[in-house]
Amino acid sequence: MKKTILGLFLYSSLLQAQLGIGTPTPQETFHINGSLQVTNSIFFGGDAYTKGSSGLPGQVLKSNGPGESPSWTELAGVPKATGTVIAVDGAFIVAQEITVQMTSDFSSGTTNNALPIGNLNNEIIDNQDSYSGNRTSNSFEVSADGIYQVTMNMQLESKKGTNPVVGIWDDKNGSWIACVNDTFVAPNDELQTYTLVTSVKMLANNTYSFRVSNLNAGFTIKHLSKGTTGSGPVTQICLKRLK
Amino acid sequence: MSADFSNGATGGIPVVIGNLNNVIIDNYSAYTGTRMSNSFLVKSDGLYQIKMNIQIATDRGTSPVIGVWDNTIGKWVARVNDYFDLPWEEYHTYTLIAAVPLLATHTYSFKAANTSSFTIRHLSSGETGSAPISQVSVKRVR
């Protein structure tokens, strides 16, 4: 029997340089027409003088195309950070996300300048630790150039007929990159919600801040909507990378 | 919504929003909505993002309130109460976006209140077509 197998092996090797098990017509150098059980490592790569690799725990096998040895690699699509997974340039990443609410109202008089919004320091999500906010200011950076979705929902109290502006300010260039400036139609001391939903390009080497201005009247950004039957947060800002 | 919801003046006591029964997503089967009522549970204690975009018609000079009501303690946990400064036939969209802690042992409802009668709109309609205009969602953040 051994002689027969050896004979088949030599015949296959010499005439076709291919070995088939369970097949008379091997399609590759070694072809098994059936299942394969492996109880120890499988090595890929290497050459006549160096051993291939059996990979690291948790790695998966990736094809490198025809004529190339497969290789062990980290499993794509399992990022470790918390957040929404997006695909950018063929790679899965966790989108940078900042969601913040206020810890108390923020008020100012008439201002010619766009002021950083204070008290915006209840951090709901800041998955890349890039945001800082305190009683009088706030700022953040983005970790990569990209398009970011901005959602600002802010309840204001101001003077009827004026146009408060809320949005995102590019601190480096000193200008708005996204803002909303509806006319305040409610009477003085009443409330109106400003909503901004847009997408903007942001750069990793800039610093940004959430700001507000009103050239013609003082204003208050409300922290809570409250009445005799309870209260809840009413102002929130969210920034999230799209691509 | 599956139809408009109208109610008389409620004073400070909110009413449950009815007709909020076109369920788009309810992946834990935790929501029930009928012509007259709605309520939901959360499966775990956590921080939840509330989004409500509700188009309202009511009397000029009132401040309708919409939000999420904790039925277990009888209080709002999230709400918005902008001033309504339009004639009755006109509409104002109220938007609430907020993250609040919700508890698995409590029951919640989407509610509304006003000192005048009000209508929450199901569709935005015109000569050139119509489409749904009011939507609410609750999504766990962490």
Image (cartoon, rainbow, N blue to C red):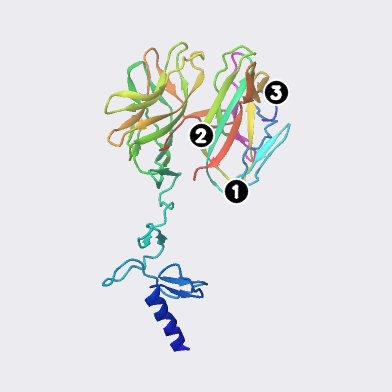
Residue A72 position (above or below residue B64)? below
Disc 1, SS: loop
Please name the amino acid that badge 1 sits on: Lys
Residue B115: image location, x then y, percent: 64, 20
Q: Which chain contains the residue that carries disc 2?
A: B
Q: Which mark is residue A216?
A: none
Seen in the image, is A84 located left or right of residue A171?
right
How many discs appear? 3
Seen in the image, is B127 located left or right of residue A158?
right
Q: Which chain contains the residue that carries disc 1?
A: B
Precedes in sequence: disc 3 or disc 2: 3
Q: Residues within 10 Å of mark 3 (few under 14, many from 20)?
A: some
Residue A215 position (above or below residue A49)? above
Residues indicated by labels 1 and 2 sit on the same polypeptide chain: yes
Distance of label 3 from label 2 (alpha carbons):
25 Å
Can residue A209 be seen here? The reply is yes
Please name the amino acid that badge 3 sits on: Ser
* Residue at mark 1: B43
Residue A11: image location, x then y, percent: 41, 79
Magenta span covers which residues? B60-76
Distance of label 1 from label 2 (alpha carbons):
19 Å
* Residue at mark 3: B6
What residue is shown at x 63% (from left), y 33% (from top)? B110
Residue B29 position (above or below residue A7)? above
Q: Which chain contains the residue that carries disc 3?
A: B
